[in-house]
Amino acid sequence: MVTQHIDGEGQAVVVTPDGVVKTPLTAEQEETRAAEQVQVLQSRADELAADEQKVTDKASAKAKLIAGEALTEDEANTIVL
């Protein structure tokens, strides 16, 4: 069985029944790795922003319900009946 991964030092690691081979990443592999990291960070930032918006909508919905005001659709969606 052969496995491949990138270690913490930025080297490609190939593990075979005959042993482990480490090689530096090529420029293309480095670019791909950096792009993947940016994509993961952006995805996480988007998730955090969505979570924050839900908290804001829920607080706003509560305040509007107490005041007897109409809710937006997003605020209404935060209410669990």
Image (cartoon, rainbow, N blue to C red):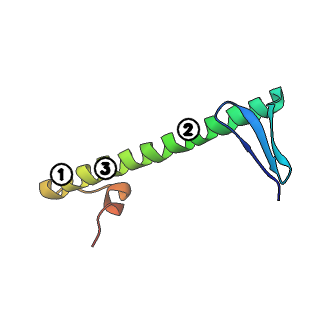
Nearest to the eye among marks 3 and 2: give it.
Answer: 2
* Front-lying residue, 26 or 35: 26
How many neighbours does mark 3 have within 10 angstroms: few (below 14), some (14-19), or many (20 or more)? some
Q: Quadrant of the N terminus?
A: bottom right
Tell whether 13 sits left or right of 59: right
**CA gap, disc 1 to disc 2?**
33 Å
Nearest to the eye among marks 3 and 1: give it.
Answer: 3
Residue drawn at point x = 25 percent, y = 49 percent: 60
Nearest to the eye among marks 1 and 2: give it.
Answer: 2
Residue drawn at point x = 59 percent, y = 42 percent: 40
* Front-lying residue, 40 or 26: 26
Q: Earlier in the sequence, mark 3 or mark 2?
A: 2
Contact, CB < 8 Å: mark 1 with mark 2?
no
Residue 20 in the image, given as x and y percentages of width and height: 79, 43
**Residue type at mark 2?**
Leu
How many neighbours does mark 1 have within 10 angstroms: few (below 14), some (14-19), or many (20 or more)? few
| Residue 68 location, quadrant | bottom left
The tag on residue 63 is: 1
Residue drawn at point x = 70 percent, y = 31 percent: 10
Contact, CB < 8 Å: mark 3 with mark 2?
no
The tag on residue 41 is: 2
- To which residue does mark 3 refer? 55
| Residue 52 location, quadrant | top left
